[in-house]
Image (tube, helix red, strand yellow):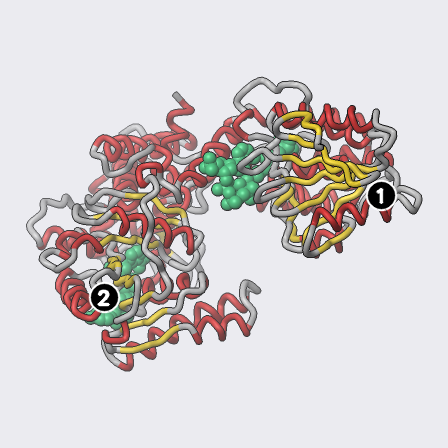
């Protein structure tokens, strides 16, 4: 009978092999109770003379997925994880980690404390701590270089990306890759290991110093890649310490680094985003409403968005019917789609065969009858209400009455697009972001009649496409474009107040954005927003003139016209402050007004975004502040390690 040391840890016996099974749903995270249970198991098994080796295995979906991130805000409790890992390593009998799912962070560190690591062929291992703004805190930076060498350790720890079993085996991060019954295979591995001399515990293995110049090269590369995040460079320093100092000194240095980062603003932000991202695809308010089955999709319009959306659907294995206006437009749409997959092949994201298989999954046509068995159809035609209404009228006639019909509109009111059509319960807005096969954000915009099942289907689609869904109420620009409008207006107000365009962009890049608001407009084109404003004016709305309007009217639409907010040398993309723009805008700048400097600019503009976010929450357009942060991070390039405008301003108090 298995003796239960703790409810989360049970011990069974297979002859001379003890099997320690961890069962701590949902991902066997190393909370205090589990750490205590494993500590007690090590003590009990050391004392049992009949046990010659131990297999550590987990129930559920994965091996230990790491420390319990929910404990990070609290004072660390004993047994501390590095002590537990050392205790397992010092056990009288060799432990064999049997890994399935993802052995991540503290989970992989537990495996490093074992004498051997056996991975199921579908498993992966990793040290993703830097993505949480910290470094491994239980010997990951000290044991990994001793197990797999410095270069592999630097990649694994400073990149934070998991490694699949086969590659892990090649790197030496695991000792064997098995298929089928992991428990049986690990027991057999343990028995076989007992017939040979045991390898040294990892902490006693030597570590070779890298080539001269290695550390400086890595420091330069990581600084460039980290874009303001502190943890990757600190992780590199830990690995260097592991090479240059005795094991326990390096371990102490790592622990000190981990504890110092754990309370940092960046770690708090990245933890908040981590939990928001996990909560987003399964909204609590939907309860257990079942989504409709999705086996076949339709996309109307094969332009920028339609092709991107079709690519995302095909990437997820959904066959697609792509409908366009005429044969020429169908050919163009398919060519757009083919170009997306060719790009994927060039970047090594897809093989030629996969790209061909994706293209085999799409049918291009002008005939709406081809949509008769589609479960979901997404419209992505011109942003004109008449065109969209005509398309939905055709869809209502051609599709099943229960097919979900979605519009990808950016600014039109979905209620006006589908108003008057039968079966309104199946309508919804699905606002993808360009490029739709890359950007993870999906704003889900129900109309008043949208059925819960339709809404649940929108979230199920997001899960299938590996996107981050955020439900938005109906207003101009929903959540993201509404905040973008406020952000741009606030930036223009700073220009009117005497702050230079270049200073504003530099401040936002310094804050962590890839580019500032003016550079971004030059890249995307000033005319898109200009046309949207002109459309609103034509519809009778009072839309004050913006500085952007002045530039567009002067023919300055951005890089595509050789100049926008900035000048550009012919064929170049580097933004050059423009005396022409300064002259154009001079009449609109308040002379002597207090110009802002550096970080104050960014704090002010982020505060403006958060102010709009608070209004959006008050109006019920968004449900949670974290939803707004996800929109900004995944739709508009807000630096993840700042947590989003709502988190950042709340943290600043
Ligand atoms: N701690 C606590 N809860 C966690 C968790 C964690 N580490 N990881 C996931 N969860 C919860 C998650 O919030 C969700 O909860 C549920 O588990 C399913 O997650 C000392 C200090 C493992 C690949 O960074 O990458 O170890 O919403 O929806 O898609 O050096 O979760 O159901 O209530 O993501 O199957 C390092 C993070 C920690 C792993 C599974 N470890 N997790 O993906 O499920 S730091 C990580 C993941 C550390 C040591 C350091 C993924 C997954 P709920 P899910 P999934
Ligand atoms: P686009 O001009 O690139 O593509 C529109 C496509 O619709 C064209 O290929 C056109 O041939 C096709 N089309 C027009 N009338 C049609 C009809 N009756 N039947 C079938 N096809 C028809 O436009 P886009 O940038 O892809 O935008 C499409 C929609 O997506 C718009 O509503 C836009 O607001 C929205 N959107 C655009 C972006 C963006 O960044 N471009 C982002 C999010 C949402």
Instruction: Report helix, strand or loop for mark 2.
Output: loop
Q: Is mark 1 within 8 Å of ligand 1?
A: no
Measure how far apart labels 1 and 2 are at the Cα level.
66 Å
Q: Classify 10 Å Cα crowding around label 1: few (below 14), some (14-19), many (20 and above).
A: few
Count of numbered tags: 2
Residue 19 or residue 646, whichever sits in front: 19
Residue 123 or residue 540, whichever sits in front: 123
Q: In the rendering, at what x and y percent does residue 389 appear?
A: 14, 63
The residue positioned 33% from the left and 65% from the top of the image is 297
Residue 415 or residue 84, whichever sits in front: 84
Q: In terms of image quadrants, where is residue 327? A: bottom left
Quadrant where the N terminus sits is: top right
Q: Which residue in the protein does label 2 denote?
A: 400
Q: Classify 10 Å Cα crowding around label 2: few (below 14), some (14-19), many (20 and above).
A: some
Q: In terms of image quadrants, where is residue 369? A: bottom left
Q: In the rendering, at what x and y percent does residue 77 appear?
A: 63, 18
Verify CB contact (< 8 Å) between mark 1 and mark 2.
no
Q: Is residue 364 left or right of residue 552?
A: right
Q: Earlier in the sequence, mark 1 or mark 2?
A: 1
Mark 1 vs mark 2: give the one in front.
2
Q: Disc number at residue 208?
A: 1
Q: In the rendering, at what x and y percent does residue 193 appear?
A: 86, 46
The residue positioned 12% from the left and 60% from the top of the image is 421
Q: Is residue 641 left or right of residue 327?
A: right
Q: In the rendering, at what x and y percent does residue 473 appear?
A: 23, 42
Q: Is residue 216 left or right of residue 314?
A: right
The residue positioned 82% from the left and 44% from the top of the image is 190
Give above or below for 451 relative to 331.
above
Q: In terms of image quadrants, where is residue 558? A: bottom left
Give above or below for 531 relative to 237.
below
Asked if one can make out residue 512 in the rendered structure from this viewpoint, the answer is yes
């Amino acid at each position: 009978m298995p003796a239960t040391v703790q409810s989360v840890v049970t011990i069974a016996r297979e002859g001379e092999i003890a099997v320690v099974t961890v069962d701590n749903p949902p991902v066997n995270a190393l909370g205090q109770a589990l750490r205590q249970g494993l500590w007690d198991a090590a003590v009990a098994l050391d004392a049992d003379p009949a046990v010659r080796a131990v297999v550590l295995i987990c129930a559920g979906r994965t091996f230990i997925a790491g420390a319990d991130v929910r404990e990070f805000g609290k004072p660390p409790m004993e047994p501390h994880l590095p002590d537990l890992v050392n205790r397992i390593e010092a056990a009288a009998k060799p432990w064999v980690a049997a890994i399935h799912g993802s052995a991540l962070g503290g989970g992989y560190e537990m495996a490093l404390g074992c004498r051997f690591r056996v991975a199921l062929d579908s498993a992966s291992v990793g040290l993703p701590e830097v993505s949480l703004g910290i470094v491994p805190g239980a010997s990951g930076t000290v044991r990994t270089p001793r197990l797999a060498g410095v270069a592999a350790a630097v990649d694994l720890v400073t990149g934070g990306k998991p490694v699949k079993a086969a590659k892990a085996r090649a790197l030496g991060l695991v000792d064997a890759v098995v298929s089928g019954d992991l428990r049986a295979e690990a027991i057999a591995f343990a028995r076989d290991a007992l017939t040979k001399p045991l390898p040294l515990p990892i902490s006693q293995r030597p570590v070779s110093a890298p080539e001269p110049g290695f550390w400086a090269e890595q420091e330069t590369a990581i600084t460039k890649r980290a874009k303001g995040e502190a943890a990757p460079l600190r992780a590199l320093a830990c690995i260097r310490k592991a090479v240059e100092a005795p094991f326990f000194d390096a371990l102490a240095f790592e622990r000190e680094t981990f504890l110092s980062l754990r309370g940092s603003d960046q770690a708090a932000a990245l933890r908040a985003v981590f939990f928001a991202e996990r909560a987003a695809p399964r909204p609590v308010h939907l309860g257990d409403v079942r989504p409709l089955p999705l086996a076949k999709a339709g996309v109307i319009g094969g332009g920028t968005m339609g092709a991107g959306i079709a690519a995302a659907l095909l990437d997820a294995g959904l066959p697609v019917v792509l409908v366009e206006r005429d044969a020429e437009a169908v050919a163009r749409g398919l060519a757009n789609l083919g170009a997306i997959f060719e790009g994927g092949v060039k970047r090594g994201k897809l093989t030629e065969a996969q790209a061909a298989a994706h293209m085999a999954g799409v049918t291009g046509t002008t005939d709406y009858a081809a949509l008769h068995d589609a479960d979901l159809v997404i419209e992505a035609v011109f942003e004109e209400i008449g065109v969209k209404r005509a398309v939905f009228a055709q869809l209502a006639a051609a599709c099943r009455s229960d097919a979900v019909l979605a519009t990808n509109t950016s600014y039109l009111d979905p209620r006006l697009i589908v108003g008057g059509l039968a079966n309104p319960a199946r309508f919804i807005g699905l606002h993808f972001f360009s490029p739709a096969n890359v950007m993870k954000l999906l704003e889900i915009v129900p109309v008043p009649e949208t059925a819960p099942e339709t809404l649940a289907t929108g979230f199920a689609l997001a899960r299938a496409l590996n996107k981050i869904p955020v439900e938005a109420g109906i207003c101009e620009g929903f959540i993201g474009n509404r905040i973008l409008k406020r952000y741009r207006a606030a930036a223009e107000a700073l220009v009117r107040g005497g702050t230079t365009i270049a200073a504003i962009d530099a401040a936002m890049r310094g804050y962590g954005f890839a580019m500032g608001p003016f550079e971004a407009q030059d890249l995307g084109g000033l005319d898109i927003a200009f046309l949207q404003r002109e459309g609103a004016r034509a519809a009778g709305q009072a839309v004050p003139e913006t500085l952007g309007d002045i530039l567009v009217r002067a023919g300055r639409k951005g890089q595509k016209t050789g100049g926008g907010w900035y000048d550009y040398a012919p064929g170049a993309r580097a933004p050059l402050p423009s005396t022409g723009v300064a002259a154009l805008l001079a009449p609109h700048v308040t002379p002597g007004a207090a110009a802002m400097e550096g970080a104050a600019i960014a704090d002010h503009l982020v505060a403006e975004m958060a102010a709009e976010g608070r209004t959006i929450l008050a109006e019920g357009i968004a449900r949670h502040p974290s939803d707004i942060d996800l929109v900004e991070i995944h739709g508009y390039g807000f630096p993840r390690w700042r947590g989003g405008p709502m988190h950042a301003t709340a943290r600043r108090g």
